[in-house]
Amino acid sequence: SGTRIAPLPPGVQSVGAFRDGLARAAAAGRWGFLGMTADWVIPPQFLEVTDFNAGRAMVKVSRTPEQWAVIDKGGRGVV
C-alpha cells in the first residue's frame, strides 16, 4: 500500500508541496504548477509563485518594475 508517485517532467529543478491540488515547480528558471499526475497544469512561465489557496495563487510576472498578478487554477488572471 502507499501512494503512487508519477515521474517528474524533464528539467524540473524544484517542487513544492501540493496545495489546493497543485504543486509549484521550477524548470529552466521559471515557475509553474504541476497536477497530481506530475503534468504541467500551468507551464513554467513566472519569476516567482505562491502556493494555491482557495483556488488562487500570486505570480510574479516582472522584476522591473516588480509586478505580481493573481491567477486561478487554469492559469487565467483574476481581477
Image (tube, grey):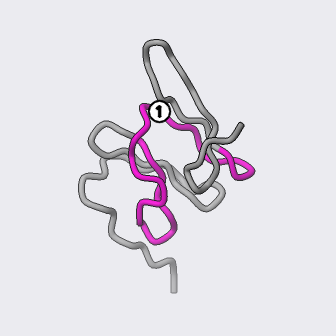
Say if 52 sits above or below 21 in the image. above
Amino acid type for the residue under numbered disc 1: Glu
Asked whether 49 falls inside the magenta stretch, the response is: yes
Element type at mark 1: strand
- The crowd level at tag 1 (other Cα within 10 Å; few <14, some 14-19, many 20+) is many
Residue at 42%, 31% (x, y): give it.
47
Furthest residue to the top? 65
Residue at 51%, 80% (x, y): give it.
2
Q: How many marks?
A: 1
Asked whether 16 falls inside the magenta stretch, the response is: no
Residue, disc 1 = 48
Q: Quadrant of residue 71?
A: top right
Say if 10 sits above or below 14 in the image. below
- Looking at the rendered image, the quarter that the C terminus falls into is top right
Residue 22 coordinates in the image, percent (x, y): 56, 58
Furthest residue to the bottom? 1
Residue at 61%, 62% (x, y): give it.
21
Furthest residue to the right? 54
Q: Quadrant of residue 45?
A: top left
The segment highlighted magenta reads 31-56
Pick the front one: 27 or 13:
27
Say if 22 sits above or below 31 in the image. below
Residue 39 coordinates in the image, percent (x, y): 41, 66
Q: Is residue 20 left or right of residue 22?
A: right
Residue 67 coordinates in the image, percent (x, y): 54, 21
Say if 17 sits above or below 4 in the image. above
Pick the front one: 76 or 34:
76
Residue at 75%, 50% (x, y): give it.
54
